[in-house]
Image (spheres, rainbow, N blue to C red):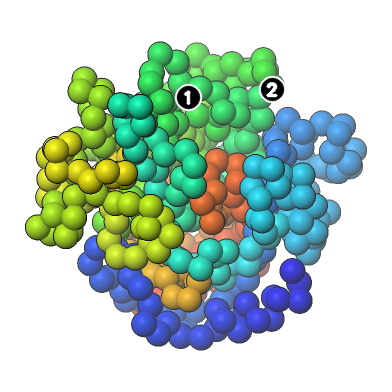
Amino acid sequence: MKSALPVLLGLLAWPLAQAEPLTLTDTWSEVNWNDVPVVSRTLFFPGKVSFEWLNSSRHPGFQDPFFEQRRCNACHKDEEYGLGNMLVKGSQDSYPGKMGALRLQLQIAHDNNFLHVRARWQGQANKPARLHSLLTLENGQWQPLQFNAPAEEAFSIMWDDGSIPLFSSQGCFLSCHLPQEGKPAKGQGPVLKNYLAAVGAGSDKFLPASHSGRGARAKPLKETELMQQQAQGQFADVWQWRSATSGVLGIVDDGWLLDSHYQDPGEPSVKLNFNPRTGEPIWMFNPEVQGRSALNKLDLLKQQGLLTLVEGHNTAPFDAAKLPKGALLPQYYVSRQQAHSSEIQRIEASWDKGIYTLAFKRPLDTGDNKTDKSLQAGKVYTFAIAIHDDNAEGRGHFVSFPISVSLNPKVDADIISRELNGAQNP
């Protein structure tokens, strides 16, 4: 794996040429990224490592008397490849052929109003991830496709401003709690179970301070206590780009994490393409726009062109009589007509010969301190980054150790944000 790293870095250094846009309309960042330093980080496959394991005697580093103050990479400096390759060997049944680590190039800048982020990485697949969760007709019922089911590429940042205990040292590992893994939603059919899991209902992700007890005994605090923690800013801000759903609209989903993972208030742009009353999809493709009414198994292999159902653009009401045999339809559709909650703007997303490029900007202060954290020039924050690559969902992602990000050029950090357009520090 390490021997291929110089080649990968060389590929990432090339400018984009004939890149395939992954958004419905071309949008390009206004930042001259050639003027912004590039910081490389290795993300690794975390296996079944959980907060409970990390903070127990089973973790050798736990014996250190300064364990809670030390960051992960204080003990594991430059060990991401080794850790990832070791952990992925024990997961080949679930993730056959998966790499143990992934190299990320990150650029961060800010002006007086916005934080600008650009990320580039090389995926494992030889095609862009333009599909996510398909429905197929089996035994007279529409159900999620199981065999060779596609999953979109996702890039996530979970971050904190110093309000969450241990986040600066343990990052997103605070949110992973193994006993809740795969906890099913109750009382629903297979399509709705998948949907509830996707939108966060029954999520096993939460911050330890939001629960009493640990592991299987962990229980959420009372609502009044959780509201108090939220009011004090003891939640993580979560941004997620998703290549085949909301990302097609040029959106980075905006959410937050406390006792569970929530989306910010507002109508979601991603909706379930399934009517539980009829047991059928809501939309199919409009043949006059898409050239056909449904997808097929060849699309799983090629993943070319727009394969997302976009309401009002390429959709038509579902009509079983117009579907060919073996039809596949997206389990979700996206809507440009909804007032999405995300304040994250101006998305650049593309794929070129295996390399994903993503750039976006987010207001330093969104005006909503209930579900968003503010960024201030002169301060330091902790970012934890995850990438879901090559049809991976859930824990099949790559993660970073905590990354310190400074918006003050005089304060050292893993990444020092480049000041743009005369941005001033207090």
Which amino acid type corresponds to the residue marked 2 in the rendered image? Gly
Q: Is residue 360 left or right of residue 319?
A: right
Label 2 Cα neighbours within 10 Å, binned few <14 / some 14-19 / many ≥20: some
Quadrant for residue 61, please give it: top right
Residue sitting at x 69%, y 22%: 215
133, 291: nearer the viewer: 291
Residue 150, image x, y percentages: 45, 49
Residue 353, image x, y percentages: 48, 76
Asked if labels 2 and 1 touch by Cβ distance under 8 angstroms, the answer is no
Q: Which mark is residue 215?
A: 2
In this picture, is 133 found above or below 17? above
Residue sitting at x 64%, y 47%: 95
Which part of the image, by quadrant, shows the N terminus?
bottom right
Label 1 Cα neighbours within 10 Å, binned few <14 / some 14-19 / many ≥20: some
Element at badge 2? helix
Q: Is residue 277 left or right of residue 43?
A: left
Which amino acid type corresponds to the residue marked 1 in the rendered image? Gly
Q: Which mark is residue 297?
A: none
374, 190: nearer the viewer: 190
Residue sitting at x 16%, y 60%: 291
Which one is earlier in the sequence, the residue at label 1 or at label 2? 1
Residue sitting at x 55%, y 79%: 12
Quadrant for residue 135, please give it: top left
Q: Is residue 69 left or right of residue 313?
A: right
Q: Is residue 193 visible?
A: yes
Q: Which residue is mark 1?
A: 202
